Amino acid sequence: MGRVTPESVLSGFRLSLEDTPVFEELKDRRGLLAAQISLFDLGECGGRLVFPVHDEAGQILGFKIHKGPHLKADGNTAGKGEGIPAQLYPYFHLNADPVWVVEGEPDVWRLATEGVQALTGTAGAGTWKPEWTERLQDHQEVVVAFDHDEAGRKGQGTAVNALRGKVHRLREVVWPAELPAGYDLSDWLNSGHTLEDLPLREVTGTVSGTGSGTASRSRRDEPAPRELVEEALGWLPADEYGAWVEAGMALHHWSRGNEEGLALFDQWSQRAADKYDAKEVRQKWASFGSQGGQALTVATIFQRAQAGGWQGLEAKERTDGRQRGRAMINGHSAVGIVDPSPQVFGELEWPAPQPLPDSLPPVELFEPALLPEAFRPWIEDVAQRLQCPPDFPAVGAMVALAAVVGRQVALRPKVADDWAVVPNLWGAIVGRPGLD
């Protein structure tokens, strides 16, 4: 009998979910789709809903039965003192931006059907850890929406107070008083409302400010100028699916999903006239950011463009460097150096700075045509649904196929020799942290 592992226990829970009342409830009453049920590894144990709880590194700490006891990583019931330490759930949404903080895992699952990434504490509304604030600080936007009851109001207040001054924009839900006690986001969406209808209010003092009370932002927080992004896009191929998806995801992150970003994505997509479909562009745009993992940023566009010969970013950096140099000299003059001499400060038009070595050379885009024809539609479908580069499912699929073939096929390079080479394949995937 094989060794019991958390993964084998999880596999059993997932298999037992199919065609059960629990499965039907997830779809009919909670409005979940098969994609969300699979994404969050939902399963069934003893007629009740069960799901894994991971630490930040993605290791399974144990299993949580919805409104029931915890199970240890081996599937056995946890005794007193053996419960799972409170975690932010799910671990793969820690890099989401914007992110919703809600009360209860079902709201996380339901929001996923709307393309929204959310987090919750696994120990209920009354628990908020200082390290959770540290993990969420510096986010561009956080929305806090706990349940409409006394525990929810207290928990929401605790979370808001902890995040105040730590994120750039913080909003919280204000439930209408006439709603029944215990009303939550899932109830709101299942009754026909949308997130746009949700009554939210701004939380003041959301970013640590300067002495004048204005928000302090670093140069890294400032979005790249549209002209620069548009220029870099001109160096990317719009007719290659992988490049098209990557650029769209990066534009979505750069524009925070607004209409300006969509218009730029649509305009660039039209360069591939034989493949352009306005409806598909909008549908794909709406899907960006709906999965877990760290988002692609506009730096991806710049990196791909530079690999193709674009030098616009380097020219901008040289211009910005000279402007910052002048500002620094003017700053010195303002504090008492009236006539800075060339011997001290040098000429204003300094030589262009030399670029530092790039420790992450650009990676060539994976071409689906390299795959066997039987695999190609499947891999492209998986990459599209998971919003990941096709390299990820392709490498795993080809290595698995080689394992199935095994020693049944061999190559004999020499005519008069029995030397045979078995086509074993070894694969490794390197990606950003949190990319599934």
Image: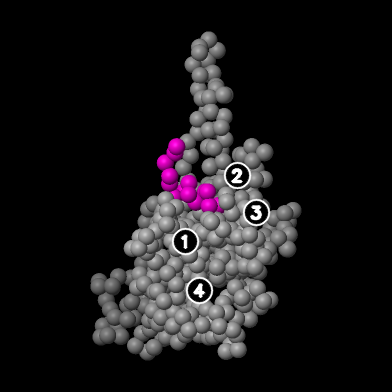
Contact, mark 2 vs mark 4 (Cβ under 8 Å): no
The label number, if any, that marks residue 128 in the structure image: none
Image location of residue 413, percent across then percent down: 53, 19
Q: 10 Å neighbourhood of mark 4: few (<14), some, or many (≥20)?
A: many
Question: Mark 1 belongs to which amino acid?
Answer: Lys
Question: Mark 3 belongs to which amino acid?
Answer: Asp
The quarter of the picture where residue 378 lies is top right
Dividing the image into 4 quarters, which one contains the N terminus? Answer: top left
The label number, if any, that marks residue 367 in the structure image: 2
Q: At 32% from the left edge and 81% from the top edge, which residue is drawn?
A: 331
Examine the rendering and report whether any part of residue 320 can be seen: no
SS for dot 4:
strand
Q: Give the range drawn in magenta.
A: 1-14
The quarter of the picture where residue 37 lies is bottom right
* Between discs 2 and 3, the one toward the N terminus: 3
Q: Is the magenta stretch mostly helix, strand or loop?
A: helix
The label number, if any, that marks residue 19 in the structure image: 3
Check disc 1 and report the residue beneath it.
64
Check disc 4 and report the residue beneath it.
102
* Between discs 1 and 2, the one toward the N terminus: 1
